[in-house]
Image (spheres, coloured by chain):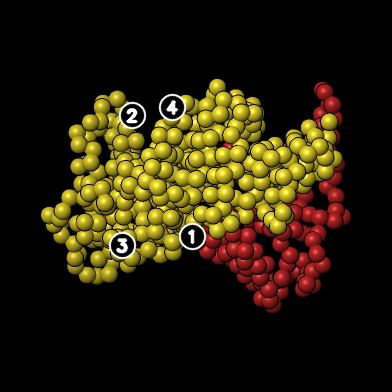
Amino acid sequence: MAERTGVVDEALLRELVPTVIAVLVRRGADFASAEDAVQEALIRALGTWPDDPPRDPKAWLVTAAWHRFLDAARSEASRRGREAAVDAEPPAGPVAGTDDTLRLYFLCANPVLPAAAAVALTLRAVGGLTTRQIAAAYLVPEATMAQRISRAKRRLAGLPLDRPGDLGTVLRVLYLVFNEGYSGDVDLAAEAIRLTRQLAALAAEPEVAGLLALMLLHHARRASRTGPGGRLVPLAEQDRSRWDTGLIAEGVAVLQAALATDRLGEYQAQAAIAALHADSPSAAETDWVQIVEWYDELLRLTGDNPVVRLNRAVAVGEADGARAGLAALGGLDAGLPRFKAVQAYLHERAGDRGLAAELYAAAAQEATSVPERDHLTREAARVRQG
Amino acid sequence: MKYLLLKHYRGGPERVVDYAPMDRWTPEEVDAHVQYMVDLANRLQESGEFVNGQALQPGGSFVRYDGEGKPPVTDGPFAETKDLIAGWMMIDVDSWERAVEVAGELSASPGPGGKPLHEWLEVRPVLSDFGPSTG
């Protein structure tokens, strides 16, 4: 499997991580110790495989991790002055299957965990990333990330690994990973897609497919979403020739299969909206009427979620005119994130440039990221210039 | 989400507790104050929330560009400036409420007589470097 190229097949290594954790758990290790042992084996593999690639990477990882686990268990036992309770010879348990990986998704995204902890643990135990990589991606010190992960594991201690989990939480965690920008050497959006793709293969749930489709369709536009210097390019101004048609085709196919099950959910509805944009040869030809219909569906599915209503108002503004869009904002809290940006856009379209400029400037003050702030500031300047 | 907790030498709302400058405290009071900060940073490290912390010297200067080929102009230090930043701690927490809670703890650092200083700290959300992955 591994080639003598001097380069570790990191993708393969990472795919093996959840399986190897499951093997250790099946041999009697608790999840927290198993996960630690596999992480240490992973780091060793990254160091030694370039010079000495194993013939069977999975067997290598299982052996290395099992030994790490035994060492840790022995030193823990001797620290407590007791005999090691674990046997060096692993019991012949059943072979770890795909269900084990699925259970890991549920465990790592357990609703008792704070979101940031669930994200970190999922990336390490299911994604096979090292603590250092996760810390670099989230711009925190490695020691802090290590603590966040061990705390999460302590919180999970004693929870059975085989209990059915909350799929909604798993999907939220994966979507959080997708929505995080990244630094360091790990592309979190691509990683989120990989993990969602793997989950879709393990669980034939239309909402998993819906989330995968949503990610693929947004990821297809990534190259056109930023201009020189990281400048944010809004959908209407994106160069559609730079959209990744392969990802779009895959996203649409995944979505259609999900919709065919007739079990509609939020992610499928959001993906349907993304697909309508992807389908349109130009911004002007967008089927806004159908997009508004999907937002109506989303409102129903989310129990009148204000963020959905805000985005729906933009679509209404395109379908029925800016005045109708502004009317659709009625009743929404002005403190809602991006509310002022949407208001600014609609007022500009309605011809009130003075008010639009003020609202863009105010929206820039409330932006949560540098690219958004700069974009809104630029919009205010553009509208003021006339 | 990251937040910066800014500590000011001067500036901000009026002090709740009036205390002498640190150099007039007893060495034990200074030690207790410093130890409190170290302990808090350690606790935040353990809770997976600590990003970094730095203290600043009060001195320094304002600097500006003065045109092509000219050296930058400096101005200051200003002994009487109204607002002076003493240092910061950056944290990565789940909510604004948690950031306020941590700032409250930091503000309880002990001063003379071991009593909390109740000093005002400024809490500022940090802008993410990254735009949305959607859109």
Q: Dots 1 and 4: beta carbons under 8 Å?
A: no
Distance in Å between CA atoms under marks 2 and 1: 36 Å
Q: Dots 2 and 1: beta carbons under 8 Å?
A: no
Q: Mark 1 — residue?
A: A114
Mark 2 or mark 1, whichever is nearer to me: 1
Mark 1 or mark 4, whichever is nearer to me: 4
On whether disc 4 and disc 2 are found on a single subunit, the reply is yes
Chain letter of disc 3? Answer: A
Distance in Å between CA atoms under marks 1 and 4: 36 Å
Residue at the (49%, 60%) spot, across then down: A114
Would you say A363 lies left or right of A190 here?
right
Distance in Å between CA atoms under marks 4 and 2: 28 Å
Local packing at callout 4 (Cα closer than 10 Å; few below 14, some 14-19, many 20+) is few
Local packing at callout 2 (Cα closer than 10 Å; few below 14, some 14-19, many 20+) is few
Q: Position of residue A276 (x, y in %)?
A: 53, 35
**What amino acid type should be assigned to the residue bearing mark 4?**
Gly
Q: Which of the marked residues, 1 or 4, is nearer the chain's N terminus?
A: 1
Local packing at callout 3 (Cα closer than 10 Å; few below 14, some 14-19, many 20+) is few
Residue at the (75%, 54%) spot, across then down: B85
* Chain yellow in the figure, letter: A
Residue positioned most to the right: B80
Q: Mark 2 — residue?
A: A7
On whether disc 4 and disc 3 are found on a single subunit, the reply is yes
A172 above or below A240? Answer: below
Mark 4 or mark 3, whichever is nearer to me: 4
Q: Mark 4 — residue?
A: A246
Q: Which of the marked residues, 4 or 2, is nearer the chain's N terminus?
A: 2
Chain letter of disc 2? Answer: A
Q: Position of residue A136 (x, y in %)?
A: 50, 43
Q: Which of the marked residues, 4 or 3, is nearer the chain's N terminus?
A: 3
Q: Dots 4 and 2: beta carbons under 8 Å?
A: no
Circle number at residue A163 = 3
